[in-house]
Amino acid sequence: MPGISITSIFDNGRRMIRRPKMKNEANYHGREQELDSPLGNYDQPNDYILESPRELCPDSDEEDVERRAIEDDEETKAASAAMKKKKRKALMEFRCRVEDAIMGNYILGKPSRRISRNESLRQKEQLKEITLWGVPLLPSKGHQGTDVVLLKFLNARDYKTSDAFEMLKRTLKWRKEFRTDEILEEDLGVSGLEDVVCISSRDKDGHPLCYTSYGPFKDKDSYKKTFGSEARRQQFLRWRVQFIEKGIKKLNFKRGVDSMVQITDLKDFPGPDFKELRSLSSKTLLLLQNNYPELIQKNIVINAPLWYYVSHVLRSRFLSNRTKKTFIFARPQKVTKTLLKFIEPEELPVQYGGLKREQDDEFTPEDKVSEFIVKANTINYIEIPVVEGGLTMVWDLTVVGWDVLYKEEFLPDDERSYNILIQDKKRLQGESVRNSFYFSEPGKIFVTFENWNFKNRRVLYRYKAKPTIPIYRTNR
């Protein structure tokens, strides 16, 4: 149409459409249209009208979002497929390099030129039987665990085959020099440290739980006996390696659980002034990183004092990103809550707020635990039935979150009988409780909780009944 001009402009996702205007037409109301702005009024020349894409095409946003979602999903799948291809390629290349190094007799370094040909052949035959963590390393043997072990080194070096190969060579060389294959049979003579380390039960995914507690070293005599000389410190380091090797024996590299969870308890840790212990702890951590890649699935540190966090930040400069990601810290008030994320309550020791007791004659891990929530600022109770007389009731309970009041009381079914106060009101501060009582008549046990905190509290409990003959009857 002659004399008419139409202009459209897109600005920040909004479409600005100019109203058709005849030549020599007066401005709207005789002036330029004034539009409001967050910064005040301003003149918008040429009568622009602002419209959003939704107003122009209501279905455009939905279609665009759906299209982008499909594209993102396709990109993710393509990236995942490319990464899998890269990993398979790296593993095949790594297998070939390891095979060549073993068959060529240089996996442990270049052989000496001074040895005879017969000796060289003998070494090659021996090298074909080389193992790591009980798994044959020669890929052509076809062992199911070989690829699992090799993948740990590839993971630790971000699938860089050359770096993984050098790491494997250094690990094998260190094991030969440290004589780790013989360490399980050694009596290192480190007495009085039975309470420092232990391997107890497994987490929810089946990983062995390796506990380390430094509390016993608070005693100065024990500390001096263990770290008083360089020879004793080296013996302690060897003892720590022996403990790691014992944990590896509980792993299954044939498509099973192939890593451990390490829990370090720093309650009653001697302190930053005990430099020998801090130095050996750092050495052990670096030793794990460099010679036991991907064997520690989680490194949970509990009851850590404030100074330890500062020390850990400084030490982290020497740790790889993969090692840093394994660390989980829990302060005293959060120990039970943190550990129960990974460990079933019946597998968590009582000193950490669980229900597991050593040499327990009452309960087994098969006795499952029930859960009860005590809401904030309320009084709630658990009811345990006593179905008949002549029973001894045994019950376990723990409170996640601490600081609640609880009481135990028996109410018989016979209204003419007296109520029995089993446990008067007391405050629970993170400890687990076990109690038992003989009942001569049926009724109910009421375990009452008073939670005057602003947050809910989680109660874990279990109970069982045992038929019992009273002592006074057996003495008749």
Image: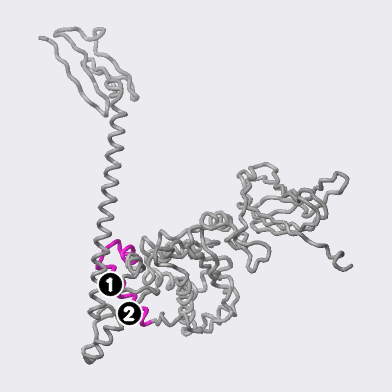
Residue 365: image quadrant is: bottom right
- Quarter of the figure with the C terminus: bottom right
- Residue 336 x %, y %: 58, 56
The residue drawn where x is 49% and y is 83% is: 232
Name the residue located 18 percent from the left edge and 10 percent from the top edge. 21
**Magenta stretch: includes residue 155:** yes
In the foreground, 308 or 420: 420
Highlighted range, magenta: 152-177
Q: Nearer the viewer, residue 131 or 452?
A: 131
Q: Is residue 472 left or right of residue 335?
A: right
**In front of the other: 454 or 148:** 148
- Give residue 414's quadrant in the image: top right
Residue 326 horizontal side relative to residue 40, left or right: right
Query: Label 2 to label 1, Cα distance in Å?
Result: 11 Å
**Image: 181 above or below 447:** below
The residue type indicated by label 2 comes to Glu
Pointers 2 and 1 in contact (C-beta within 8 Å): no
Question: Which residue is under mark 1?
Answer: 140
Location of residue 290 (image quadrant) = bottom left
Q: Which residue is mark 2?
A: 129
Residue 301 locus on image (x, y percent): 50, 62
170 lies above or below 402: below
